[in-house]
Image: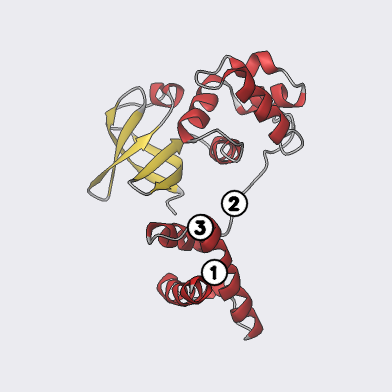
Amino acid sequence: MISLLTGTVRSIATDRLIVEVGGFGVSVLVNPQTSAQMTLGSQVQLFTSLVVREDSLTLFGFINDESRSLFELVQTVSGIGPKVALSILGALTPEDLGRAISQEDIGAIEKVPGIGRKGAQRLILELKGKLSDLSSVHPYKGHQPAWREQLTSALVSLGFSPKESDGAISQVVSTLQADGTDAAQLDLSELLKLTLASGKSARG
């Protein structure tokens, strides 16, 4: 999983940046507020979230880890995908969103393009309690260990569903723990081999 990107800004559009990292130009989707803070040729550090689909790999970028965590959390709400999640973060600061959810302020959320009243109600219902007023409390952190995120991404790209990936990884972790081995200490390639074997036996 690509979680952090540091490089030189080579192109700026309202909804995306191209950042040069080690000679490669990486396209990163951002909201207009993030884009407006960029300068061509400047160095930038972005906290990123990689969204894996059958036909695409899309990288979304944020100025801080708080926004990235919130972007990932908002997508746990049924009916909200990455584009709408990015739109929410473009229209509301993490503090504003946290306040709107804690105060059940549907009006503040439904102004976000692409969400509507029903979406705002669902957001409040599903995130209430997971997200406090962010002006005083840190946001919910839904991160798994980096190695597990990378392993899940690799399995999904090989055709596993997220649920199958999670089950196979958990099985391998349990097996390793029984042998006194910490999964975090193994190479990703070794973990992938073990998980593929475990996933195939579970499938068939």
**Marking on residue 143:** 2
Q: Is residue 21 left or right of residue 4?
A: left
Amino acid type assigned to the residue bearing label 2 in the image: His
Vertical order, 75 against 165 (above or below): above
Amino acid type assigned to the residue bearing label 3 in the image: Glu
Q: Which residue is mark 1?
A: 168
Where is residue 66? Give x, y as percent. 59, 37
Q: Which residue is mark 3?
A: 149
Q: Is residue 181 left or right of residue 147?
A: right
Residues marked 2 and 1 touching at CB (< 8 Å): no
- Mark 1: secondary structure: helix
Of the two numbered discs 3 and 1 on the same chain, state the one appearing first in sequence. Answer: 3
Residue at image x 40%, y 21%?
36
Where is residue 154? Give x, y as percent. 41, 61
Vertical order, 53 against 83 (above or below): below
In which quadrant of the rendered view does residue 196 lie?
bottom left
